Amino acid sequence: MRTRIGLAAIFALVALTGCTATGPNDSPAPVESATNDSAATAAPTSSPTSAPAAEAEFTDSLLVDLCVEKTTQDHGGSPEFKKDQATVEAIEADPPWLVIVPATSAVGDAISYCTIGGTPAAPVYELHGAADPSMEAEIRSWATS
């Protein structure tokens, strides 16, 4: 009796699992649909893409403003910057910009100096500070060495 119950259970399991010759990882073959779906037959369209926006570049006035902002505290007091007399030079160094801005402070004539690189959104300063105008040649030497 137990044998019959066991055989019946095995037969039921085989019948329920669908004994086939294909392996369990085979996928069913695609079946063609008889429906007329316009979305399925429409050709794919490509939407126009624009080129990525060019990264902003430094301008002379931006470089001068960045240098003034970075060095204002180095002068002590409230310096008066002469932005119209500032010089901005591309140098063979990293960072590639040398900025010198004349100023008048509580101690007299001075200059602010900066070497600036990076991007306008994230500027990088190597040299920066306030100095006597007589040090301009030395600062230029430091910036390019």
Image (cartoon, rainbow, N blue to C red):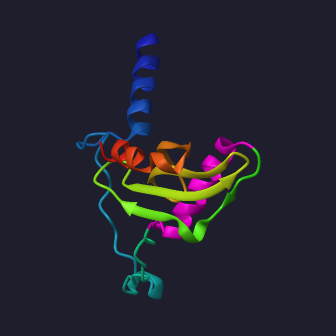
**Which of the 4 image quadrants contains residue 10?**
top left
> Left or right: 60 with respect to 91?
right
**Which residue is situated farthest in the left direction here?**
21
In the rendered image, the vertical position of residue 6 relative to residue 75, given as above or below:
above
Is residue 1 in sight in this rendering? Answer: no
Is residue 125 in sight in this rendering? Answer: yes
In the rendered image, the vertical position of residue 33 relative to residue 80, given as above or below:
below
Q: Nearer the viewer, residue 33 or 56?
A: 56
Residue at coordinates 61% horizontally, 47% vertically from top-left? Answer: 71
**Which of the 4 image quadrants contains residue 46?**
bottom left
Residue at coordinates 70% horizontally, 51% vertically from top-left? Answer: 105
Magenta stretch holds residue 52: no
- Return the x and y of residue 4 as percentages of the image width and height: 42, 18
**Which residue is situated farthest in the right direction here?**
77
Q: Nearer the viewer, residue 21 or 118?
A: 118
Q: Nearer the viewer, residue 59 or 88?
A: 88
- Return the x and y of residue 145 as percentages of the image width and height: 29, 42
Q: What secondary structure is the stretch in magenta mostly built from?
A: helix
- Return the x and y of residue 89 as percentages of the image width and height: 39, 62
In the rendered image, the vertical position of residue 100 relative to residue 32, given as above or below:
above
Residue at coordinates 66% horizontally, 56% vertically from top-left? Answer: 104
**Which residue is situated farthest in the top direction here?**
2
The range drawn in magenta is: 55-76
Residue at coordinates 40% horizontally, 13% vertically from top-left? Answer: 3
> Left or right: 113 with respect to 90?
right
Magenta stretch holds residue 75: yes
Q: How many marks?
A: 0
- Return the x and y of residue 77 as percentages of the image width and height: 76, 45
